Image (cartoon, helix red, strand yellow):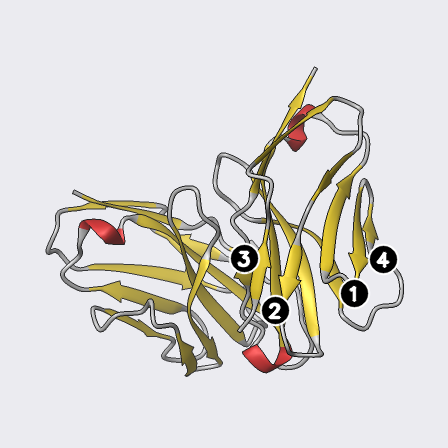
Amino acid sequence: AQKITQTQPGMFVQEKEAVTLDCTYDTSDPSYGLFWYKQPSSGEMIFLIYQGSYDQQNATEGRYSLNFQKARKSANLVISASQLGDSAMYFCAMSTTGGGNKLTFGTGTQLKVEL
Amino acid sequence: DTGVSQDPRHKITKRGQNVTFRCDPISEHNRLYWYRQTLGQGPEFLTYFQNEAQLEKSRLLSDRFSAERPKGSFSTLEIQRTEQGDSAMYLCASIFGTSGNNEQFFGPGTRLTVL
């Protein structure tokens, strides 16, 4: 079975500062993918970034980067230069090849960006 | 429109009534997933299809729930004899491929309220 743990229910960050959202995972499948999604109050799930278990380098997408530490089973999301529009719920998720690629989500972190 | 669409966006029903939701995936995507998200939680997997075949059902999917994807294109999720505990956001997602761990594209969701 797969498990995702997000231990930060809520986070605050000042505009233009960087913030790290924590995520740890557990799986016995050697082939897996780690995802971060953003969910604004409107409810849609917006894909942010993906990291494959065999990828040697950390993934980056614009202001988003994923700090992948395989030995520690962590996949933290780093948002640089925070903007007011980054205020939303952020979910870490995992899929495994042996699990039909279905996503297992964490409980999420509510991020609020302040002036 | 090239995204995943869901209909209706909102549904209010009385306990005991049947409801049906529809999901139209991205046209070339062969896998379609249903998730349920209750307030303050991450989405939870319900079931998924590869083309028209339903390959996995979660234990969350009681016998009051049924899903179909008759021609490998759109999918429907029906809930019979709704209960107040069925109130949630129902999300549909699709991907192309059977191997690897690909980004899932989510629809806007159907928010169900059972009175």
Q: Earlier in the sequence, mark 3 or mark 4?
A: 4
Q: Is mark 3 on a helix, strand or loop?
A: strand
| Distance from the alpha carbon under mark 4 to that under mark 2 | 17 Å
Tell me which corner region of the image, top left, top right, bottom left or bottom right, holds residue A111. Answer: top right
Q: Which amino acid does label 4 sit on?
A: Asn
Q: Mark 2 points at which residue?
A: A95
Q: Are marks 1 and 3 in contact (CB under 8 Å)?
A: no
| Distance from the alpha carbon under mark 1 to that under mark 3 | 18 Å
Q: Name the residue under label 4.
A: A58
Q: Which of marks 2 and 1 is nearer the N terminus?
A: 1
Q: Residue B115 at what x, y percent from top left? A: 16, 42
Q: Earlier in the sequence, mark 4 or mark 2?
A: 4
Q: Do the residues labelled 3 and 2 touch (CB within 8 Å)?
A: no
| Distance from the alpha carbon under mark 2 to that under mark 1 | 15 Å
Of labels 1 and 3, the one closer to you: 1
Q: Which amino acid does label 3 sit on?
A: Phe
Q: What element carries label 4?
A: loop
**Which residue is at a point 83% across and 51% down the rendered structure image?**
A60
Give the number of the disc on residue A105.
Answer: 3
